Amino acid sequence: MVIAMNEIEKQVAFYRGYLADDRSLASVAVILMTAIAMCLLFYLVSLVGPAQSDPQAARRAPASTTVAVSPAAAR
């Protein structure tokens, strides 16, 4: 029984080196929560932003701003 326990302890010690450290998990959790909080903040700010006065205006194609210049006017 002791031999089997020593073998298990060796395997556990080997694989324990591949486990993530608790301190590194804390920093990852803080970064992840900060990113989620920023996304939520931007989303909530976009909801509170100014409303469209004409809801159909957003669906219409934008007006063309191309200006035709005649060769005589270009001189």
Image: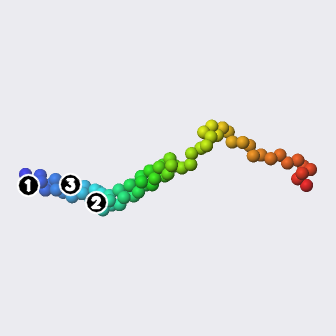
The total of numbered circles placed on residues is: 3
Tell me the CA gap for discs 2 and 3.
Answer: 21 Å
Q: Position of residue 63 (x, y in %)?
A: 72, 42
| In the displayed structure image, the side of residue 9 where residue 26 appears, left or right | right
Q: Mark 1 belongs to which amino acid?
A: Val
Badge 1 density bin: few <14, some 14–19, many ≥20, Cα 10 Å: few
Q: Residue furthest front?
A: 53
Q: Position of residue 50 (x, y in %)?
A: 56, 48
| In the displayed structure image, the side of residue 74 where residue 65 appears, left or right | left
Tell me the CA gap for discs 1 and 3.
Answer: 14 Å
Q: Is residue 36 above or below residue 24?
A: above
Which of pointers 1 and 2 indicates the residue nearer the eye? 2
Q: Quadrant of the C terminus?
A: bottom right
- Residues at circles 1 and 3 in contact by the CB criterion of under 8 Å: no
Q: Residue at 61% across / 43% down in the picture?
A: 53
Earlier residue among tags 1 and 2: 1
Which numbered dot is residue 2?
1
Give residue 7's quadrant in the image: bottom left
Q: Regarding mark 1 in the picture, which secondary structure is present there?
A: helix
Give residue 28's quadrant in the image: bottom left
Badge 2 density bin: few <14, some 14–19, many ≥20, Cα 10 Å: few
Tell me the CA gap for discs 1 and 2.
Answer: 31 Å
Residue at numbered disc 3: 11
Q: Residue at 59% across / 44% down in the picture?
A: 52
Q: Regarding mark 2 in the picture, which secondary structure is present there?
A: helix
Which of pointers 2 and 3 indicates the residue nearer the eye? 2
